[in-house]
Image (cartoon, grey):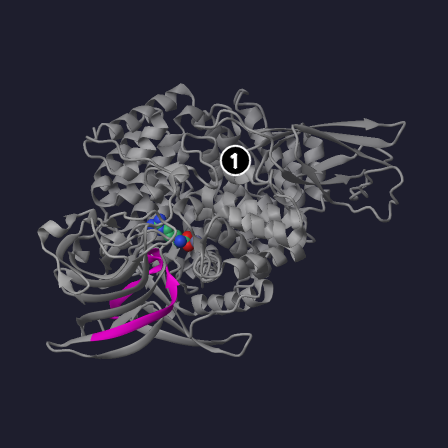
Amino acid sequence: MRTSQPQTIYLKDYEVPPFLVDHTDLRFELFEDGARVHSTLSMRRNPESAAGQPLELDGDSLELESVALDGQALSDGDYEATPASLRIDSVPDQFSLSVVTWIRPQDNTRLEGLYKSSGMFCTQCEAEGFRCITYYPDRPDVMARFRTRIEADQSRYPVLLSNGNDVERGELDDGRHYAVWEDPFPKPSYLFALVAGDLVEKKDQFTTVSGREIDLRMYVEPRNAEKCDHALVSLKKAMRWDEEVYGREYDLDIFMIVAVDDFNMGAMENKGLNIFNSSCVLASPDTATDMAFQRIESIVAHEYFHNWSGNRVTCRDWFQLSLKEGFTVFRDTQFSSDMGSPTVKRIEDASLLRTAQFAEDGGPMAHPVRPDSYMEISNFYTLTVYEKGCEVVRMIHTLLGPEQFRAGSDLYFERHDGQAVTTDDFVRAMEDASGRDLSQFRLWYEQAGTPRLTVEDEYDDAQGTYRLTIHQSVPATPGQPEKQPQHIPFAVGLIGEQGKALPLRLSADEDENDAPTQRVLELTGDSHTFTFHGLQARPVPSLLQGFSAPVRVDYPWTRDQLMFLMSHDPDGFNRWDASQRLASDVIESLMHQPKDVRTDRRLLTAYRHLLADRSLDQALVARMLQLPTVAALIEQSETADVQAIHEARRRVLTELAVELRDDLVACYRRNQESGEYRLEPEDIARRALKNTALAWLLHVKDEEGRMLAVKQFEGATNMTDRASALRALVNSDFEGDRQQALDRFYGQFKEDPQVVEQWFAIQASSPNAGSLAHVEALLEHEAFDWKNPNKIRSVVGAFAGQNLSRFHAKDGSGYRFLAKRILALDETNPQIAARLVSPLTRWRKFKNVYSEGMKSALETLRDKPDLSKDVYEVVHKSLK
Ligand code: ARG
Ligand code: ZN
């Protein structure tokens, strides 16, 4: 066991920083065995803070070489230094502090602070990585102007980058050189970045709305030179979009993007120097799927949008993380929606939320969008802070309407430019600009848990009225036993007999021509009743249109009603939702039936219509044809029996695929034609539909399907088609073809880490191929590397997160496997280790055969001596 319990940090204990930094001057001497960091901080006491406090700076694993105060070297007795802090009891009101530290980027496997990734130096400072570089008040409300000088060997590291503008460069002795960068915008230390390496530069240009020329530069390893175009195109789209939609112009003269292979997260918005995980920025049609292209577009935009929502206006403390992340995710979802199919984008976002975020909100790590305590902040880069945080901003947008929302955002940026603020400041700007009272709405930031809406209805034939009664309840979550009702925008429509959206008249005198067909009902109490007038017959309710709030809705739709909504709901999102509810209901009911009970024919009919319907957005059709995932079905069940869910789902899939065989072949052939690869929505939809049909055919070992898959695999002109064919073969029972395809694919792409990651993930997530033994073998593969987070995610993460029937093997072997890997990883990269604990945390959600094994895996973790703070927090909260 850990000898001491890690400290819990509370929001209520927030105090303003006792010292401020006006200027941060850094000099890095980079060597092969380490780096020397010289820092000179111009500091002063914060006038808003209590007088006489000692100076205390944060550190993490630092070796101190020297300290000087106002140019005078200090001796041992003048300060107290540990690897984790530097304390000087008496300092003047204003002073300059110079510190020299020695750090070892080469041995940095945590990938926080300064580290090496395939030969280059790079940094990741959010949230608390800067303290691994030098002693500093490493908190976001301390903002300073940075000047950074980098010195390194010229031939190994010709490119030297940091934030801001490149102001000076030159040569030094011994084949070394230097560059000096100056960032005119005061920033917190978490936005600091440095890169040194042998990189190629891709240049582009952007002219801002006011006519300023911005240099865009992308830096990658030479082998990736051909994979930059998409990111640069995405960047320019994002820059234009932010000007048009939010009135935000870029502020420096240069904007840089760097790709690195070893990265804990997706990307990082360092001022003027965004650093990306290679897998989230590099793409070419040969190596990246449509999904990857879309993900890259949204991540490039996300990081760019942070320049305003995050950098110009930043967070006061880490409890406010959603201030920048929730808002920026909202901005990137709006952007992606404008660039592609809005309905499909909404479906993707909502299904992630409903499976993964709802699971988090219902588990032991549940926390509010603005948490009020944490042990390790890295554990709070969560779906709740990001995705639910985005939904909270979206609800403000829905309640205020686009114009007032824009006015609120303008006011927010104007009022707080250059400041470190709170989510409350954000909401207040929205209130002040719109005149709306959002006091009850603020509970969305404070209360954890997913609200549940239970809807009842009543049709009065004589009066021609229809009443909807909506009850709201917010479940108890750890530390929050009692909840208050929240302010929920609930978008509804009513569909009439002919499949027409009916006018929604909330009073008898309302003119039917003026009445809208969608209304956003505002729920604020425990229950509300709304009466709609002038109806000739009982309508079918279309509830929570567009997923207008991150809540669960219970309403007893019949299967016939769901089929009706699937083909008539004007709200595309709810058409999809109806398809998922229908399929879930069918699958769930089969779980308790003998093997010879057949699938409800209505599901078959619904799918047959879908496959034939060419009037619908084909991207939506492809989505509707996907059965709910095992993860979604687990989330919907009271206590989950994974094997029973998996089996029932397979039965339905098999029966449908057999019956729909000819329709699937026809659908495949209709969408087969693949001319030159284009990233247009219609082409993406065509590929998605075709590949869905292919997967279904192979699922039932169809011979023609097999021939089509092999042909597609061999002849593919792009990675979407190639990887889809490979996945279909891997998930099939054609074992010979499977192995052959896997070998060929690896042979062809083994030099490309991003493609190898896909190759790993396709196997590890496959219930057919990805047996535990096979996954263990992948860990021994020459391309696997325990130091590379992407590889870990693509094998261990994909197995535990997506291959649920294998991971939840009843003998507990999957859980023991995961625990063993986490224990080893905890020594090298605790952040990644802690993320991998997540599949075990919801043990209470599962039937005993599973939960006992999950719990005992958690106990194994708990018993490790000197567990990292990261893993400690997740494990202990899960076992509580
Ligand atoms: N701020 C980054 C983003 O845009 C995430 C970086 C988080 N990094 C970390 N080590 N926790 O989403
Ligand atoms: Zn972000």
On screen, 819 above or below 518?
Answer: above
Is residue 705 found inside the magenta-colored segment of the image? no
Identity of the residue drawn at 22% across and 56% down: 134
Q: Main secondary structure of the magenta part?
A: strand
Chain part drawn in magenta: 178-198
Q: In the depicted view, which residue is nearer to us: 692 or 371?
A: 371
Is residue 195 found inside the magenta-colored segment of the image? yes
On screen, 167 above or below 607?
Answer: below
Point out the image quarter for the C terminus: top left
Point out the image quarter for the N terminus: top left
Element type at mark 1: helix
Name which quarter of the figure residue 339 lies in: bottom right
Q: How dense is the environment of label 1, judged by Cα within 10 Å: few (below 14), some, or many (20 and up)? A: some
Name which quarter of the figure residue 144 lies in: bottom left
Residue 162 picture location, percent across and down:
31, 67
Q: In the depicted view, which residue is nearer to us: 873 or 859?
A: 873
Residue 321 picture location, percent across and down:
43, 48
Q: Is residue 49 left or right of residue 492?
A: left
Q: Is residue 824 left or right of residue 624?
A: left
Identity of the residue drawn at 67% across and 44% down: 609
On screen, 94 above or below 729?
Answer: below
Q: In the depicted view, which residue is nearer to us: 684 or 310?
A: 310
* Mark 1: amino acid: Thr
- Residue wearing tag 1: 654
